[in-house]
Amino acid sequence: MGSCLCGSVKFEVRPPFSAFRYCHCSRCRKASGSAHAANIFVPQGQFAWLSGEGLVNHYKLPTAKTFAVSFCTRCGSRVPHLIHERQEYLIPAGLLDEDPVSRPQNIIFWGSRAPWYVEPQEIPKFDERP
Ligand SMILES: [Zn+2]
Ligand SMILES: [Zn+2]
């Protein structure tokens, strides 16, 4: 199961995933507000809304062929959206409430990564705040 930050939007997604990857493209960086997106793709039939679908708004980037995002209008979290051309749902992985067992297979648009991006193994880590 997955949910947005405020918990209004909930959905169910069933494995196996068609793909699980990080995307560093400039659009994903803008849309996520972060270094990269972490996207899971599943065939349409493996996804179902459980609640809050009416709170979901959608933005399609006019200058792009297919780039779009859906978000919870209460809390602003990205939420899944259907990619019509592929009959697949894109699931932002950060929404998942359980370990999906699958792990990311690759990174795309690595050449577009932010100049400030530092690979996690290169910097100190704290289990909570330092
Ligand atoms: Zn929400
Ligand atoms: Zn991207």
Image: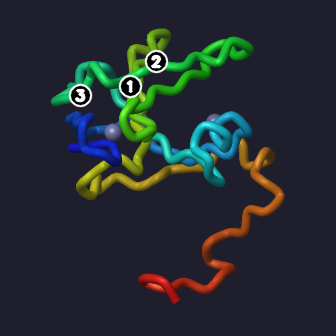
| Callout 2 secondary element | strand
Picture residue at 66% right of the left edge, 81% below the top: 123
Q: Amino acid at mark 1?
A: Tyr
Q: Residue furthest front?
A: 74
| Cα–Cα gap, marks 2 and 1 | 6 Å
Q: Residues within 10 Å of mark 2 (few under 14, many from 20)?
A: some
In percent of width and height, residue 101 lies at 29, 56
Looking at the image, can residue 104 be seen? yes
Picture residue at 70% right of the left edge, 39% below the top: 25
| Cα–Cα gap, marks 3 and 1 | 17 Å
Instruction: Give the residue at mark 1.
Output: 89
| Cα–Cα gap, marks 3 and 2 | 19 Å
Q: Residues within 10 Å of mark 1 (few under 14, many from 20)?
A: many
Instruction: Give the residue at mark 2.
Output: 83
Which numbered disc, 3 or 2, marks the residue closer to the eye? 3
Q: Earlier in the sequence, mark 3 or mark 2?
A: 3
Picture residue at 68% right of the left edge, 12% below the top: 62
In the image, 126 versus 20, the foreground residue is 126
| Callout 3 secondary element | loop
Q: Earlier in the sequence, mark 3 or mark 1?
A: 3
Left or right: where 74 falls relative to 39: left
- Whether the residue carrying mark 2 lies under 8 Å from ligand 2 is answered with no
In percent of width and height, residue 79 lies at 39, 34
Instruction: Give the residue at mark 3.
Output: 52
- The quarter of the image holding the N terminus is top left
**Residue 103 quadrant:** bottom left
Ligand 1 quadrant in view: top left
Above or below, 60 relative to 79:
above
Q: Amino acid at mark 3?
A: Gly
